């Protein structure tokens, strides 16, 4: 069965609409709806008041119609009363501005008051609904992503650093603090990368991303520990601003779930291949995307790449609020509309389908830590960003390719492409060499392997693998052969035999990556 | 008589220049000058010091020359000593930055210290000059427009909301707070729309604009209550950032006065038609515009549309300060200049003229609440903004047209055009239907009537009037006839007979709005 | 001898690398390296801990190899412990954000804690190394440039104003405070030009730039007073944001030193002519520029214009930190690289050269106070900024021209060009008239001489000199002859005989400034 449905927010509607909703869901072939994502202020109207009655009725109604429920913990949007009671649990941004309630995601994940309040509401939901018939999936929080720079975070960051580095000397070495007199004597001297006079330390920036990811993961885990009765997931939102290391988080969910709002079908295919890569053989689903009159065409790349669910944001368009013009399965104008008819047509085609099993023979490496590192200030300008580069390489493949993190097992692939893999720790170096030594075919591109996991430059670190000496963007081939030259005569593509395998190194931006290049 | 003159700031000049000024004013035909707009620090050099002597002399000098005085209360720019004594009366911007003295308009209109200080200086001016021979007009404050987000404002906002909504449940409904868990239990949980983590609630944003407008109007009224001896006005500055609901304020002034700094004659004609519309049959004047060597040509659109006064900012160019390069009637180089000669020529032509009475047969609806609502985050992108759209429609008319607010009386017009009237409360719906039922001819455009006064979507609300079902941007004609199609075959212009009248609905951007379209 | 070398940061490397460095320096012909710029956290790891041992060894090593040392005081980058102990010594930016440690230059030069800490470390360096054999030059701080708006600065600004103006009345007059009610009763009412509601006062802005420059100069002087055993300098960084009045500072250094990071050779020539102008006959050197494979070509414009030193940032590329990708004399890939070979080739050519003595017959006036004044808000738009305008005129000269401040002695020049000299105090007016009266040839351009040293408009102030009346951009020639007209018939270039000399006035942007124009 393919899960089919979307976010359902019955609290925005009077109860007579609920019955109509269930009828329409059945008409559309919906079998799973996500409930409760932003219900905290309804479920807990005050610090000591709780109201689960309406949610009982919603779950019973859905359950009796045979529609499964993905029940969300509502922790991504604390209610106004929480803000008022705990002003220091509101996030502080990079510029020192304490943010206010008035949108969503206004919380500091490291604030004790937020942690206890979010665990309390999750615990109550868990004990009440773990055994409910309609429950199919737990959905923790929503799109983790609020980066905060407050003093709670500073303290937690210091603890995280102490655990990671042990002593200040190791931190100083990792962060290259001798540059610009940043050497610390103890961890208490470290701050989050708040607004400063000039360029920030790239190692500090990168570690802060990792720390925020870990702090959020800790919050996720503490919620997950309370949940039972169904698999647990959270939805991954994509984008360069997101401080979540999804490859790592993917190991902590029972099913990988992504939210995807791209503009092209090629980008959808990329996201699908990426979700499958994160899932490492486990199931993945599309948790959110935008309903449209091209729903069937849009669903195809996900389905072809193994999605076990096609879900939308959202079921019924919200009359008010900041996303009132967001597309919906049931638009403002109701079910007698092209969008709802198209959604229903898709539902019909999915009714008896099973998820596709995908076995790709090629892998494309995508690394969010590299993406973060490439956001450092003062890097040499590039014609395109990291994500655009990887997506361009992805488009060179014809069918599904596994988009995998650098610590994935590569041995089974015929071909591995690693574009712009700027950050490469020792383990990454080993993995690539092991893969090629064992007969693998690897494509690497310029600006790969320039720094280690602490953003420290590692000159020459790939020279043996690519069979050439790299001096900035210039190449002096050693064991490698030049397959192609640039118009002005410099090496554009090198080929090097290494162990039992072969490496191609692409030294410049090419117009035609295509199969010619990949068929090595 | 047409009022002719401008802002006069004698405090910037030694007294010998005053005599020269009066002579030049007489030469130029000036009969009204605005005095005192930024004189607070001269009139009250310290909290307990007052100096009106210089202003006595200025008013006497002007009066004895027969030049009328528009006397301003100086409350738009509190003196430095006020800032120093009352730091919490300085405004806080959206990002939480407390602004400092060093420009103008640094005050929070809801700060008690500011309120009492501004009423004190106004009271003293009022009692001293109410009976002065030269006094022709009171000018309260200047270009109200400082939006603040401080705690004074938060408290006043809550009181305003409590008065408007009565109870939290009504507020929750109006603001659609079930979206993103924003439901409040009491008004104390509400905040101004300060910087937040993601998109703000559009209903909260819109109510905050209304609240700021009302808070400023209260301040205006409390000053007006102190003034006597002449009509009272304040100058309206135009622009999307201004938090003043001018249609509402226009009912509180004895003469509508606008400041207008556009780039084209067509925009001047629009502003003039708008000021006349706000005046609803009462007088209006141009309080500020920029002197230039085309003064006569520039004055014409205002005069043709009923202006009772043509005033400039400012009489004599300021040697220093932030606007030292602002054009002036007497430029830095003195009266022997093309600008002063042109100003004098205009003055001569105005000497024996009377304001034109304008009777327009068509109306164009312009609604600042719609303008504000269209500034909500996350709206579907539009090719042009609200003001540009309305101005484009305005240019389709040949002569004067009344640019009126949506609650204007429409019955007398042959034709009413309502472009992009996004926000339409129930009363607005009734007014349009009454107008058409009674035989009126109405032109509506796409994206009109999409939301109510709380920015809540009202699907289908205009379908009966336009004779078609609207599904997003698609149209399914019912009783309407399609007059024109888009190049790809969709309905572009519909015509629908409704009651005794007719409605044309323009479903897309048209290149040629022109008379063809308007002659329905 | 030409000084040749660059910034050397041995603290970033283990000591075995130091020996290799010295060997490579000798190979490259390096004779001077700047040490210690960012060493504070190494030299003083805690408030009461000092470690000079490593620096002793570095200086001994360099000295015994015959390599001179330019020893920097490390005060531009206080260590993390300082930040932690003295949070109020961190700078506050224009928007009120207190900046954090995490980059460099995080200090308020007016904070007592910073002043005493920076003098302590400088005093210890001074007493330890004043007599060291290797010492050739003291380098105070690095690129002074942190503008702060904190309360320390506010207090110091008031003291500076009181010293400059004596009484509030004089300040009010200078700042034109009657505009917008900014009149102060005492200096305590004055604030730094922090974020405010609308346009800031241009005189306040300009005086704040001057004050910051003077406050930093005071800091420089207090360090210089501690230093002996070698000449003292600091490095001037160029750019519109820099709050340092270099012409004034140049009188306080024993050798003018500039950091220059331009994109064209013409800009390098300009910077060199400017440094020589600041030096007023004394020596100047290039303290920092970027190493490259065109090092010899790039050095030429500086050498041709009298540089006594060609130094780079930096000797060896940093493995980590915010500038890890900054070019270096020894790149990441080591000495066997095109860059190091080119640097060595340049070193070889410099070995037996002496600085060129330059005698220019023409001068180009460049005034940083005019540059600052032209950054005022609300100035009439110009096709290009001040620096671009002056550089364009500079390119019209064939060889070296002295780029001098407006108070330079002009008598010896055949030709003086003063482009866009917006700000012109009475002394500047006198200097230009004296120069022309005495037979000089002067080229002035439009928008020159518009305001005095307090940004107050001075209409007509240049009319006698240019022989025409200026009314905004229009010209009414009096004694001047029109040499060229604009395409639409207005005067483009005027010539006026004045005293024994001649003035050309360029009234519009010309495409061909060239020699035709300059050969007057």
Image: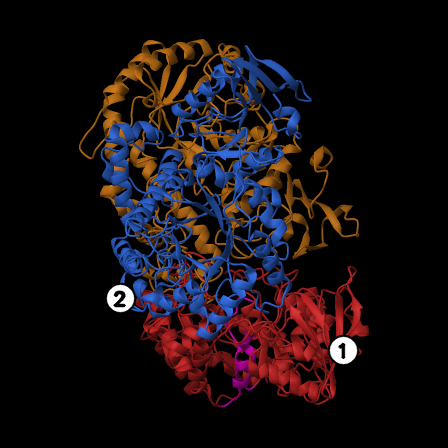
Chain colours: A orange, B blue, C red
Q: Which of the 4 image quarters holds residue A35?
A: top left
Q: Position of residue C408 (x, y in %)?
A: 62, 85
Q: Is residue C52 above or below residue A97?
A: below
From the viewer's side, name the closer residue of A346 and B205. Answer: B205
The location of residue C13, given as percent across then percent down, is: 50, 68
Closer to the camera in the image, B320 or B99: B320
Q: Quadrant of residue A125?
A: top left
Residue C90 versus residue A386 in the image, above or below: below
The span from disc 2 to disc 1 (Cα, nearest Å) is 62 Å
What residue would you read off at disc 1? C399
Host chain of mark 1: C
Query: Would you name the residue on which mark 2 appears?
Result: B47
In the foreground, C42 or C370:
C370
Is residue C243 a member of the stretch shown in magenta?
yes
Tell me the crowding category of disc 1: few under 14, some 14 to 19, or many 20 or more residues within 10 angstroms, Cα based: some
Q: Nearer the viewer, residue B311 or A383?
A: B311
């Amino acid at each position: 069965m393919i899960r089919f449905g979307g976010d359902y927010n019955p609290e925005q509607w009077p109860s007579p609409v609920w019955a109509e909703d269930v009828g329409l869901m059945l008409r559309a072939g919906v079998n799973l709806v996500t409930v409760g994502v932003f219900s905290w202020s309804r479920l807990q109207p005050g610090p000591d008041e709780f109201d689960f009655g309406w949610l009982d009725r919603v779950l019973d109604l859905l359950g009796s119609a045979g529609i499964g429920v993905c029940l969300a913990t509502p922790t991504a949007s604390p209610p106004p009363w929480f803000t008022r009671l705990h002003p220091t649990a509101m996030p502080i941004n990079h510029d020192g501005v304490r943010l206010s309630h008035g949108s969503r995601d206004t919380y500091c994940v490291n604030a004790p008051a937020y942690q206890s309040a979010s665990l309390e509401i999750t615990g109550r939901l868990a004990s009440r609904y773990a055994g409910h018939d309609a429950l199919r999936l737990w959905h923790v929080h929503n799109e983790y992503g609020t980066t905060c720079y407050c003093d709670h975070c500073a303290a937690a960051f210091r603890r995280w650093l102490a655990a990671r580095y042990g002593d200040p000397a190791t931190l100083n070495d990792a962060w290259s603090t001798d540059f610009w007199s940043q050497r610390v004597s103890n961890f208490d001297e470290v701050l989050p990368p708040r607004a400063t006079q000039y360029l920030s330390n790239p190692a500090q920036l990168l570690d802060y991303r990792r720390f925020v990811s870990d702090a959020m993961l800790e919050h996720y885990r503490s919620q997950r520990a309370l949940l039972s009765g169904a698999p647990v997931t959270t939805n991954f939102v994509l984008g360069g601003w997101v401080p979540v290391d999804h490859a790592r988080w993917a190991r902590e969910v029972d099913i990988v779930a992504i939210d995807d709002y791209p503009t092209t079908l090629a980008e959808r295919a990329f996201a699908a291949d990426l979700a499958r890569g994160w899932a490492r053989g486990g199931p993945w689903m599309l948790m959110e995307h935008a309903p449209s009159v091209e729903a069937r065409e849009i669903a195809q790349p996900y389905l072809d790449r193994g999605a076990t669910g096609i879900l939308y944001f959202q079921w019924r368009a919200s009359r008010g609020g900041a996303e009132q013009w967001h597309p919906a399965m049931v638009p403002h104008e109701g079910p007698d509309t092209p969008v709802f008819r198209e959604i229903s047509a898709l539902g019909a085609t999915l009714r008896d389908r099973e998820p596709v099993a995908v076995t790709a023979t090629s892998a494309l490496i995508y690394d969010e830590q590299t993406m973060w590192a490439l956001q450092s200030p003062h890097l040499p300008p590039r014609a395109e960003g990291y994500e655009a580069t990887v997506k361009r390489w992805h488009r060179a493949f014809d069918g599904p390719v596994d988009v995998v993190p650098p610590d994935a097992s590569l041995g089974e692939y015929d071909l591995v492409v690693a574009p712009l893999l700027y950050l490469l720790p020792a383990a990454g170096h080993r993995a690539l060499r092991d893969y090629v030594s064992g007969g693998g075919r690897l494509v690497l591109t310029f600006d790969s392997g320039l720094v280690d996991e602490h953003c420290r430059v590692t000159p020459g670190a790939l020279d043996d693998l690519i069979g050439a000496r790299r001096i900035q963007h210039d190449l002096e081939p050693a064991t490698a052969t030049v397959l192609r030259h640039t118009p002005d005569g410099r090496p554009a593509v090198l080929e090097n035999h290494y162990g039992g395998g072969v490496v191609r190194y692409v030294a410049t931006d090419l117009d035609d990556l295509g199969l010619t290049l990949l068929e090595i």
